[in-house]
Image (tube, rainbow, N blue to C red):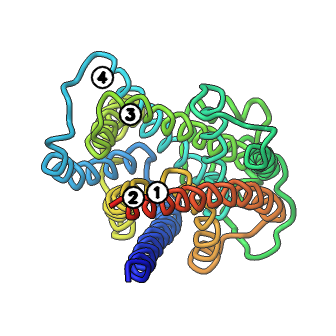
Amino acid sequence: MAMAEERRNIAKAFRYFRYERTRVQLALITVQLGYGFYYVLTKAAMSEGVNQFVFAVYRDVIALCLLGPFAYFSERELRTSLTLPTLLMILALGFTGVFLQQTLFLAGLTYTNTAFAAAMQNAIPVFTFMIASICKLEVIRISKADGMAKVVGMFAAVAGALTMCLYKGPTLFGTDPQIAERERQSSDDAPTPHVENGWFISTLLEFGLDYWQIGALCLVANCLCMGIYTNLQIPALRRFPAPVSLATSSIFVGSVALVITGLFSITHVSDWILRSPGTLISVVYAGSIASGLNFSLQAWANHRGGPVLVAAYIPLQTVFSAFLGVVILEDPLHLGSVIGAVFILAGLYLDGATIERIYSYSWQCKQQEWRLKQKVE
C-alpha cells in the first residue's frame, strides 16, 4: 500500500511539473508573438516619420503607468532601502537597458526591416552569455559536453549575426520600394525618406556606410546593451530583491534620459504630436503589450523556468515577425538574413538542448530527494 501510494504521489508530482512547464512554454510563445506584432507596428510607425525619441518616451510612460502600481502593491515586502551602490546600478540599468537599447533598436528597425531586426535579437542570449563568462558570472566547462555545446553555440550565433550584418544578398521573397529608394539615396549621400539624419547618422554616412549597414550596426549595439542589462540585474537584485520594482525604476531612469535627449534633439514641438491613428495604436501597443504584458509574462516565466529558458524562445521572434512583415508590410526576405538566422538558430539550439539536460537532471535529483524524504517519514 505504501509503495502504491508513493507511486501515485510521484506521478501526481510529475504531472504537475509537466503542467507548469507547459504553462511556461505557452507564456513564452505568447511573448514572442507579441513582439512579432510589435516589430511590424513599430516599423509602420517609423515609416510614417515618427521621431524615435518621441515613440520611446510615450512607450515608457505607458509602461510606467501599468507597471508602477503593480510593483508598488505586489512587492511591498520585497523592497529594501536604496543605497548609493543600488542607485548607481539602477542608473546603469536604465541607461543601457532602456535608453540605449530602445534608441538603437528603433534606429536599426528604421534602416532595415522587421525580419532582419527580429533575427538580430537572437544574438541577445549570446552577448549575455559572453559577458557572464567574462565577468565570471557563469563558468564554462570546456572539458564537459555541456560546456563545449555552449561554446560552439555561442560562436555559431555570433557568426550568424556577423553574416547578417556584412552580407545582405539577393532578395528571395517580397519587395520594398522604400528600402530600394534608401539604398539609391545612400549612394548619393542623401537623407532617407521620412527620416531626418542626425549628426551620428551623418557621420557614419561620411565613412562610406549605407543605411542598411548603419541599421545593422545599431541592432548589434542594441543586443550588446541588452546583454549588459541582463548581467547587471544579477548584482542589482542581490541588493534590491524586487524584480518588478527594479525594472520599473530602470524604465523611469531611461524615460528621463529619453525626455532630456528629445528636448535637445527635437527642434519642432509638433513632432511630439501623434497625428495618425496607426501611430497612436503602435505606441499604445508598444507600451501595454511589448513592455507591460510581455514584461510580466517574462518575469513569471523567468521565476518558473529560469532566464536561459526564456532566452531560448527568442528565435520565435524571427518566425513571427518575418511572416507578419511580409504579409502586412511586404518586407523583403534576403539571402543574408536567412543564412545568418540559420547559424543563430543552430547556436541557440545547442544552448537550449544543454539547458534542457540541466533542467532534466535537476528534476531527477529533486525526485530522488523527494523519494528519500517520503521513505524517512
Q: Which residue is mark 3?
A: 94
> Is 361 placed left or right of 250 in the picture?
right
Q: Nearer the viewer, residue 20 or 249?
A: 20
Query: Horizontal and vertical percent for residue 330?
Result: 64, 75
Q: Secondary structure at mark 1?
A: helix
**Of circles 2 and 4, which is in front?**
2
**Of circles 3 and 4, which is in front?**
4
Amino acid type at circle 4 is Leu
Q: Are marks 2 and 4 in contact (CB under 8 Å)?
A: no
Q: Are marks 3 and 4 in contact (CB under 8 Å)?
A: no
Q: Which residue is mark 2?
A: 373
Question: Badge 2 local density, few (<14 within 10 Å), some, or many (20+)?
Answer: few
> In the picture, which quadrant includes the C terminus?
bottom left
Q: CA distance from mark 3 to mark 4?
A: 11 Å
Residue at the image point whose x is 62% and y is 41% from the top: 218
Amino acid type at circle 3 is Gly
